[in-house]
Image: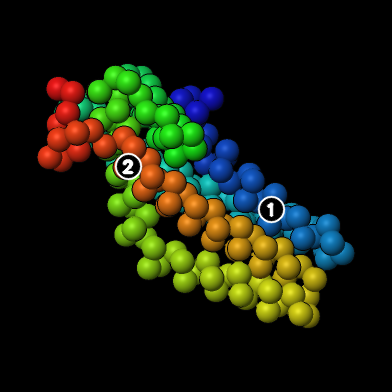
Amino acid sequence: MWARLAGAPWWVYSLFTGVPFGVLQCAPAFGGHSWSLGVIEGAVFGLAMGPLLALMSRRARTAMAEQVCDGQDEVAGPHVTEQLRTATRAVNRAMLRGEVPAEPASRRRAYRLAEYHVTTMRRMRPFVLPILVLITVGGFWFARTDQSGWWGGLTGLFVLIYNLACEAGLRRAVRLLRLPGPDGQAGGE
């Protein structure tokens, strides 16, 4: 499914990402507010967020594919999609269970992908963490007067904790996947 969605046209990916945003935007309408207004808000929000996320995902996928291509000219196609999927699984295994691929080429690709993610998260941290803290504090602040504020605060808190845990797990994966050698990639060639 992921490989098909990654290679799908932008509008298909846009539907898969926009519909959940629209449904989540529409959900508060079931708490006593105008149902028709909630559906309209959900449709507009989904139509705006779907293409935006599709564009962001394409850029991120291209950047990740460049990390696992091993110097190949082409960063698209089924072979790159499979290499990216394999490297992603290897990074996840290293993060969660401490397992490392035995094959040096797979380990090198996974190392580069994990290093890319750590660098990206480190670059985004000054912007993302304050925003998540503001969402969390703001949600709990508004919960004093409005019951739905709790959901905003809890969501912000969950995403904040998840973000910090992912960054720590990715740093662990980089340490585990690093090959012996001066730059962490040279071993096993």
Q: Secondary structure under badge 1?
A: helix
Label 1 neighbour load within 10 Å: few <14, some 14-19, many 20+: some
Which x, y percent locates residue 140?
68, 74
Q: In this view, does 159 lie above or below 88?
A: below
Q: Could you tell me how far apart the alpha carbons at marks 1 and 2 are, in whole angstroms?
A: 35 Å
Q: What's the image's color scheme? A: rainbow
55 on left or right of 70? right
For residue 177, which quarter of the picture? Answer: top left
Disc on res. 24? 1
* Image-based side of 32 in relation to 185, left or right: right
Residue at 42% x, 29% y is 99
Confirm whether residue 185 shows in the render.
no
In this rendering, the answer to whether 158 lies above or below 68 is: below
Residue under the point 84% across and 62% down: 31
Res 30 quadrant in image: bottom right
Mark 2 closeness class: few <14, some 14–19, many ≥20 residues within 10 Å: many
- Where residue 147 is drawn, which disc sits there? none
176, 67: nearer the viewer = 176
Q: Is residue 74 left or right of residue 157?
A: left
Q: Position of residue 47 (x, y in %)?
A: 57, 50
Is residue 3 at least partly visible in the picture?
A: yes
- In the figure, 26 relative to 89: above or below? below
* Residue on which disc 2 sits: 174
| Closer-to-camera residue (82/11) | 82
| Residue drawn 70% across the image and 77% down it | 142
